[in-house]
Image (tube, rainbow, N blue to C red):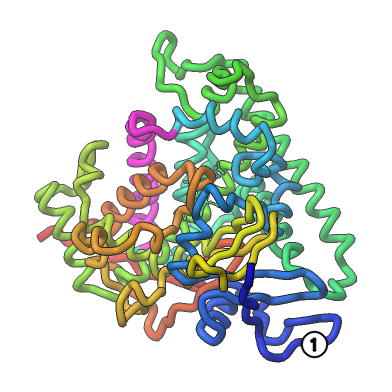
Amino acid sequence: METRPIPHPPRRIPLLGDILGMDRDAPSQGTLRQHRRLGPIYQRVIVGTTLTFVTGAELVEEINDEKRFRKHVGRPLAKLRTLVSDGLFTAFHHEPSWSKAHNILMPGFTRDAMRGYHQTMLETTRELITRWDEHATAEFVDVPAEMSKLTLEMIGRAGFGYSFDSFGRAHGDQEDPFVGAMLRALRHAEQTAIPIPFRGLFAGKAERQNDADIAYVASVVDEVIAERRANGSGATGDVGETRRPDLLDLMLDSADPETGERLDEVNIRNQVLTFLVAGHETSANALAFALHFLAQNPEIAARARAEVESLWPGADQPEVSFEQVAKLRYVRRVVDETMRLWPTAPGYFREAVADTTIGGDGDGGGYGFAENDWAFVLVLGLHRDPVWGPDVESFDPDRFLPENVRARPGHVYKPFGTGLRACIGRQFALHEMVLALALLVHRYDLEPEPGYELTVKEQLTLKPDGFRLRVRRRVSP
Ligand code: MNH
């Protein structure tokens, strides 16, 4: 069948390829700029490796078709495997460990399971608020760092009954050694993911540090697992009292209903690490972006506050129940619009199941993909497709009013990925983000640093760089 060539940047250098215009520090934002120049699909060849990027809504609709494409474990994900091996997020589609873990863990992400995590999320947010009440109101706070503590604490406690004591440490204290080692290992994976010719001469030292970090992180998780085994599942401090099974209980005590198989010790460790890694930065950064937009748009913050106040009139500390989180419709739209503009997971990889073309008209003329050829769907660009209207850069939560959502095709909003391998933690993330944002905007006025202009830092995820706020306790109306 006749195919069309995929566009590429104009100046191709012999041997090295399309390295001009590559943005090593901010690859996704660099890719967004290339799309503006080259259209909804383009290709870059770097030292013989072909990278294909897609943003156009119509092309993405085809590439999301599970019959023709599937998840591809792209280079950054493959690099993460040194840390989390065949955990859910980094498992290859053909690895049997994926469906086994998926089947065992799915009960941990039902609506009923969220009900079980709710109180922990509420209490954790209140601990942050207590700390901010005491320390933060006089000075500017590092918002992404604070949100990172909040969400790591939430997944640690809700998922595994483990606390990093993030709010016990005095303000400005050093981070937990576990968190330090995990973040270094993450950064290492990211830095070695981009193919760069003539990588630095100090690689050996970095590799040794990385080995040590991974060993340390694994030993901590093993302790958490051993402790749970020793204390038995379903137990709390009070004898005889039972609690709902969390993610760790599910992995230790249940079997895959399809095969009757259980997860082995090493795999459980990989899953715990996967959830700590995949389950905290993305939510934390999304919360930070949301607080940025609320601080920059006082009228939107006022609407969010009005919603919280109408549900809990005059409350000092709203007693938010599980069911009531779903009633925070406007706060939810703020979260949705935040992840439209800055999807903290900036995209996902797909690979062709068999030879195929996309963007053709039925008689050919499409872009060709051989079996296993892959593309990166730049969600950051998809969320700026013309289908979103003329003013894609403006922050407007009302884009997510039900009638506006209905008027758009479903495949143009994909912050949580697509298909079988889409985010398993989506409901968990939405619940924690809506809850935390509602409580924070209700309690504090958000004062941006004068002159702050949003710059976005990339470390696998996107985050607002150097973003600080002064939070002032609001006087109840
Ligand atoms: Mn999450 C997969 C985005 C929060 C656990 N997540 C994905 C994917 C995206 C994503 C995109 C698909 C990646 C791919 O196709 O390669 N996740 C997010 C975002 C947030 C988020 C934007 C918050 C905002 N994720 C969470 C939370 C958890 C979690 C919270 C855990 C509690 N995510 C996962 C896991 C996977 C995943 C596990 C892998 C699922 C699978 O492949 O089966």
Is 1 drawn above or below residue 152 in the view shown? below
Q: Residue at x 65, y 52 (%)?
A: 354
Q: For mark 1, give the secondary structure.
A: loop
Q: Is residue 422 magenta?
A: no
Name the residue located 34 percent from the left edge and 36 percent from the top edge: 118
Q: Is residue 398 visible?
A: yes
Q: Is mark 1 within 8 Å of ligand 1?
A: no
Say if residue 170 shows up in the picture: no
Q: Nearer the viewer, residue 450 or 416?
A: 416
Magenta stretch, main secondary structure, is: helix
Question: Looking at the image, which is closer to me, 140 or 103?
Answer: 103
Residue 436 horizontal side relative to residue 166, left or right: left
Which residue occupies the foreground of this view, 281 or 236?
281
The stretch of residues the image draws in magenta is 109-136
Q: Is residue 183 above or below residue 247?
A: below
Q: Position of residue 392 (x, y in %)?
A: 35, 77
Task: Report if residue 129 lies within the magenta region.
Answer: yes
Neighbour class for label 1 at 10 Å: few (<14), some, many (≥20)?
A: few
Q: Residue at x 36, y 55 (%)?
A: 134
* Count of marks, rendered view: 1
Identify the residue shown where x is 30% and y is 69%. Answer: 294
76 lies left or right of 256? right
> Where is 222 relative to 182, above or below?
above
Where, by quadrant of the figure, is residue 99 drawn?
Answer: top right
* Label 1 sits on residue: 13
Location of residue 210 in the rendering, given as x and y in whole percent from the top left corner: 78, 53
- On screen, residue 168 above or below 333: above
Q: Quadrant of the N terminus?
A: bottom right
Q: Quadrant of the C terminus?
A: bottom left
* Residue 232 x %, y %: 55, 14
